Image (spheres, grey):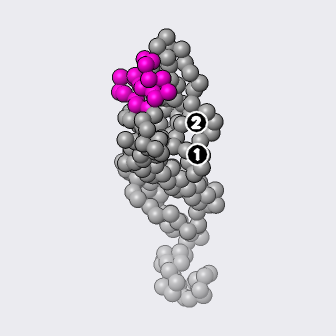
Amino acid sequence: MNFCGKCGSQINEGAKFCKGCGASTSPHPVPQPEYHPIKQPAQQLAYKPYQSTPAYQSGSQANNRTSNKMVGIIACSAVAIIVIISIILISNGGGVGHNSIVGSWVNDNGDLVFTFYEDDSCESRRYPSSSLTYKASANGVLTIYDMYDYPYIPLNYLVQGNKLFIKEGEIDTKNDNFLRRR
């Protein structure tokens, strides 16, 4: 009579396995299949599904996203400010450039000082019989030319609503004299 080497149960003659524990009775144990899970290859997706930002995201990735958001906010703010300033200048009929200066301008006494026409000609009370022309640049410089295209002193100018500031130096809209649109 034999006994199981694993659990000590009695094994009948000719039995291949122990009734107590199921161990092999042969001198060379029968190999038992081992369990190995089969690894499947990862699925390849044609698109990348939306994933929210994980809480464990590294600091540099989080900083990049934050800085990208800040750049976007600053860019949008700059565009909004430019649009608002443009709307204000257009609605006031103001700014600089050829179209903003066209018209007749009078002093505080109502005397006509300048008339600027769209064909770049102009009239001045100071030079009533002269054929004058002008150029009003987008950067705020007004140059008046005589009939020989000789430029007089370039003047700085700024139109704000119905006010025209003209001066050789820097314009101070709070303290400088101005002409009114007629």
Residue 90 position by quadrant: top left
Q: Residue 101 has which mark?
A: none
Which residue is label 1 attached to? 176
**Image vertical order of residue 113 relative to residue 59, above or below:** above
Q: Secondary structure at mark 2?
A: strand
Residue 6 position by quadrant: bottom right
Q: Position of residue 96 (x, y in %)?
A: 47, 37
Q: Residue at x 39, y 57 (%)?
A: 49
Q: Is residue 101 visible?
A: no
Q: Residue at x 62, y 81 (%)?
A: 5
Disc with the residue nearer the chain's start (2 vs 1): 2
Q: Secondary structure at mark 1?
A: loop
Q: Residue at x 62, y 60 (%)?
A: 58
Q: Amino acid at mark 2?
A: Lys
Q: Residue 167 has which mark?
A: 2
Q: Principal SS element in the magenta part?
A: loop
The answer to whether mark 2 and mark 1 are in CB contact below 8 A is yes
Give the camera-side residue of 129 and 54: 129
Q: Which residues are magenta?
A: 114-131
Q: Position of residue 178 (x, y in %)?
A: 51, 43
Q: Residue furthest top?
A: 148
**Image vertical order of residue 98 relative to residue 87, above or below:** above
| Neighbour tally class for label 1: few under 14, some 14-19, many 20 plus, Cα within 10 Å | few
Q: Amino acid at mark 1?
A: Asp
